[in-house]
Amino acid sequence: MAVAAQPQIAIDERVVESPELEAALEAREVAKAAAGEARAALKAAHDKAVGLIGELELGEAPVRVGRFRLTVRKVEARSVAFDTEPTTRLTITPDREGEF
C-alpha cells in the first residue's frame, strides 16, 4: 500500500482548505518580496546620497542641490517612554520546502 507524502504539521495545527485565502497569501508573498527589493534599493540609494551629503560638511544654512533643499538640524537627546494597549498579533509564515 503506497503512502502519499503529506507536509508535516504541528500537533496544534489544523488544515483549512480555502483556495481564495491561499491565493491571497501567495499574492501577499509576491508583494512582500517586491517590497523587500524596493526597500533594499531605497536603502542603497539613501546611503549613497547621505554619504555624498556628508562630504559637503554642511553647516546650519540650507543648501540647494537641483530641486532638493538640504538642511541639517541638531536634535538634543531626550528620554521617551510610552504605554501600549493589549492587542493580538497575527504571524504569517510561508511553508518553505523542508522548513516545517
Image: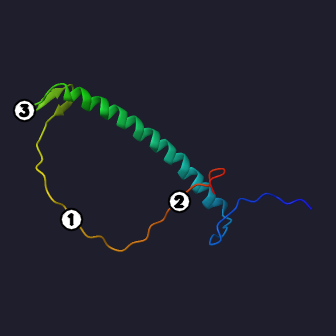
Please tell me whether mark 3 or mark 1 is closer to you in this view.
1
- Residue drawn at x 66%, y 51% as measured from the top left: 98
Residue 8 in the image, given as x and y percentages of width and height? 70, 62
Residue 2 falls left or right of residue 66:
right
The residue where tag 3 is placed is 61
Q: Amino acid at mark 2?
A: Ile
Upstream in the sequence, badge 2 or badge 1? 1
Residue 5 in the image, given as x and y percentages of width and height? 79, 57
Q: In the image, is residue 19 above or below residue 35?
A: below
Report how far apart the C-alphas of labels 3 and 1 lie in the structure: 33 Å
Q: Tag 3, which secondary structure?
A: loop
The one nearer the camera, 14 or 18, is: 14
Sort mark 3 into few (<14), some (14-19) or many (20+) by Cα contacts within 10 Å. few
Please tell me whether mark 3 or mark 2 is closer to you in this view.
2
- Residue drawn at x 50%, y 62% as measured from the top left: 91
Q: Amino acid at mark 1?
A: Ala
The residue where tag 1 is placed is 81
The one nearer the camera, 68 or 11, is: 11
Q: Which mark is residue 92?
A: 2
Upstream in the sequence, badge 3 or badge 2? 3
